[in-house]
Image (tube, rainbow, N blue to C red):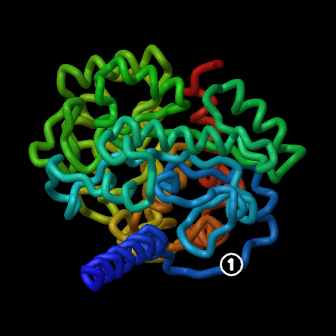
Amino acid sequence: MKLLRKAVLRILAVLALLLLLFFLFVPRYIDRSKNRSTAKGPFERVSWYDSLPFIADLHCDALLWDRRLDKPHSYGHVDLPRMQEANMAFQVFTVVSKVPAGINIESNNEHSDQIGWLHFAQLQPPGWWWSVQQRALGQCAVLQRLAANEDNQFRLITSRHQLQQFVADRAGRPSLMAGMLGLEGAHCLEDGLASLDLFYQAGVRYIGLTHFFDNEWAGSAHGEKKAGLTAKGRQLLKRMEQLGIMVDLAHASPATIDDVLTSFKGGILVSHTGVQGVCNNRRNLSDKHLDMIGKRGGLVGIGLWETAVCGKDAAATARSIRYVANRIGVDKVALGSDWDGAFEMHFDVTGTPLLVQALLNEGFSRREIGRIMGENIRDFMLRHLPAR
């Protein structure tokens, strides 16, 4: 009996050790292995790079990962110290709340969920394991807490007035940084339209109606049916208009894009994408939709990963930016990296000088590069954010 008790205790001790090792190392291993960069720094920069007044990006999934964003990291793509190093003024932090197993760009359903397992491994609160709404609001709260720490010089922007004040303050304090919240998929509105106000209060200012699967609001470019807006989706758009929440068309089906462009009167952007005219796949925007978005005064963010631009370096992204600029105007294109989105990127945030050089090689002027690298985002947000 005594020997049996000792054996049981040893087994329990081994299991406890294995669990400890799992929680300590597995989440970080997943982060490191998924969020890699092709190019490694330090990176050379043109002489006037640090004088660019407003470098900005439309899409980053860093909130998904269990990292202290106020501390520097040797892995992943974005944290505040690296943003400062890159002279980055403004970053949209997006909330990923559900991703199906075996994701692909052709066809996915909603019947599986990798994010719940990830949050379990990260030892996030149990509510995050089961509820997409709780985990989404929880990620919003992470950025709120980051902005509440005055020492890190980071602000959460939710209004036009706040952005105007930030721009004015940063002119004299270039180490200042700001962020905004966006949702990647409206499926986290578990309670329907009533939940929209919760996310508005949390600071969310743009919403991508779909992510990798169709939902009750709209069809995804990667879903099974790929339909357009549902009746509930049209109601959602009306309430978003009233609140001043913008629509992100990244991951939307062609039918959804058509429906949104004909029925939504607010700000329209595509936060992270490529274009079929350069890189032809289902993930990317057609010329037809690119033209329609341009006519609506929308903004197109070009990504930093291979599926978006059919290449693994800054030159590939610059080629797609040139295509958009030639087709709908240099004032309607921006950086939409998808940093920390569980894909290999061309570079992390400190590598933005590589894109500046690639844009120069594409023949853009210094003034045009300033627009592309962030001034277009600044002005778009100043037009479409709620006043207060």
Q: Residue shown at 55%/38% (left/top)?
A: 141
In the image, 331 versus 149, the foreground residue is 149
Q: Is residue 156 left or right of residue 335?
A: right
Query: Vertically, is 198 above or below 126?
Result: above
Q: Residue furthest left?
A: 225
**How many numbered discs?**
1
Quadrant (top left, top right, bottom left, bottom right) of the C terminus: top right
In the orientation shown, which residue stands out farthest toward the right?
A: 172
**Which amino acid type corresponds to the residue marked 1 in the rendered image?**
Phe
Is 81 placed left or right of 364 in the picture? right
Q: Position of residue 325 (x, y in %)?
A: 49, 52
Q: Residues within 10 Å of mark 1 (few under 14, many from 20)?
A: few
Towards the viewer: 41 or 333: 41
Percent x, y for residue 120? 37, 56
Residue at left offset 38%, top offset 45%: 126
Outermost residue toward the bottom in this view: 3
Specify whether 264 is left or right of 83.
left
Question: Residue visible at 35% across and 41% down?
Answer: 249
Q: Could you say which is closer to the camera, residue 305 or residue 187?
A: 187
Dot 1 falls on a residue whose secondary structure is loop
Q: Quadrant of the N terminus?
A: bottom left
Q: Which residue is mark 1?
A: 43
Is residue 120 visible in this depiction of the protein?
A: yes
Q: Nearer the viewer, residue 18 or 63?
A: 18
What is the x, y in percent for residue 46?
A: 75, 72
Q: Is residue 325 visible?
A: no
**Residue 380: quarter of image:** top right
x%, y% of residue 197? 44, 20
Q: At x 69% / y 56%, what residue is drawn?
A: 70
